[in-house]
Image (cartoon, grey):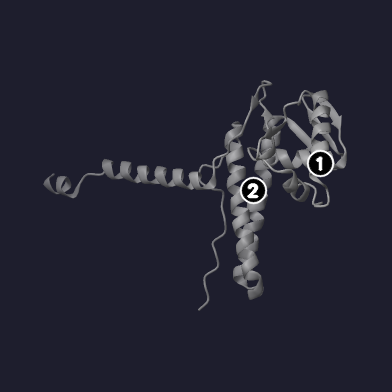
């Protein structure tokens, strides 16, 4: 029996790319990161079954999810006013320009594109630099030097350190204040959608006349 191909993804309920709220943007990033991770896991299990219609559909859905993830990450940087150019190896903020090394640019880009999350030195060597040969001491040296350099563009608090969790990014608000992002987890988002949907159905039922009232009238 051939299983039906999965339906194509569409923008999720409540998704508004014009939002000005950084925490909301961070939540959408977390949601699409989780979707991307799940689809990649499913595809890895399907690889042994050939390249049938189901696999092709999953790859198409994964491409859509990754595109949405890129869109939200770009929106996140635009709202924060922090622009990192990985080709030019530079950072721009508030009209100020800072030339970076390639590793500094890759590191900052990775942290800013994963708001509200923290990574250990070992995770950063693999995820940000794809270089597992770097030692923990080398990563800490890069971090210390980079945090010192960020003072030149008034972003000395951009990189944060949380004990037993690692390094993260705390982005500035447009007014110069800072906001520590705590993105909504995917499970909480789905739960809130279900709650809103159930409440909407109850409200709809309450506005409809009962059969007995309709019959008596």
Would residue 17 be visible to someone looking at this image?
no
Instruction: Name the residue: 50% across, 48% down.
Output: 187
Where does residue 107 sit, x and y in percent of width and height?
Answer: 78, 41
Q: Nearer the viewer, residue 211 or 166?
A: 166
Left or right: 122 in relation to 209? right
Residue position for label 1: 137
Mark 1 touches mark 2? (CB < 8 Å): no
Q: Nearer the viewer, residue 122 or 77?
A: 122
Q: Earlier in the sequence, mark 1 or mark 2?
A: 2
Residue position for label 2: 68
Residue count near mark 2 (Cα–Cα under 10 Å), binned few <14, some 14–19, many ≥20: many
Left or right: 127 in relation to 56? right
Relative to 4, does residue 205 appear above or below in the rendering?
above
Q: What mark, if any, has residue 171 been given in the picture? A: none
Instruction: Name the residue: 65% across, 66% down.
Output: 44
Q: Nearer the viewer, residue 213 or 34?
A: 34
Instruction: Name the residue: 66% across, 52% down.
Output: 66
Please, what secondary structure does the residue beneath circle 2 have?
A: helix
Please, what secondary structure does the residue beneath circle 1 have?
A: helix
Residue count near mark 1 (Cα–Cα under 10 Å), binned few <14, some 14–19, many ≥20: few
Between the residue at mark 1 and the residue at mark 2, the CA separation in whole angstroms equals 36 Å
């Amino acid at each position: 029996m051939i299983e039906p191909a999965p339906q194509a993804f569409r923008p999720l309920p409540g998704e508004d790319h014009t939002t000005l709220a950084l925490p909301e943007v961070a939540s959408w990033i977390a949601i699409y990161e989780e979707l991307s991770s799940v689809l990649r896991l499913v595809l890895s299990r399907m690889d042994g079954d050939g390249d049938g219609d189901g696999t092709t559909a999953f790859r198409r859905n994964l491409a859509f999810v990754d595109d949405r993830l890129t869109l939200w990450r770009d929106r996140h940087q635009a709202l924060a006013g922090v622009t990192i150019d990985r080709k030019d190896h530079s950072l721009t903020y508030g009209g100020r320009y800072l030339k970076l090394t390639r590793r500094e640019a890759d590191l900052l880009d990775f942290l800013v594109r994963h708001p509200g999350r923290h990574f250990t030195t070992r995770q950063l060597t693999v995820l940000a630099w794809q270089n597992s040969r770097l030692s923990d001491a080398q990563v800490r040296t890069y971090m210390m030097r980079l945090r010192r350099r960020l003072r030149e563009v008034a972003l000395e608090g951009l990189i944060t350190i949380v004990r037993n969790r690692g390094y993260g990014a705390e982005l500035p608000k447009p007014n110069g204040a800072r906001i520590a992002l705590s993105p909504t987890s995917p499970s909480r988002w789905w739960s809130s959608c279900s709650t809103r949907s159930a409440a909407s159905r109850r409200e709809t039922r309450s506005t409809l006349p009962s059969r007995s009232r309709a019959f008596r009238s």
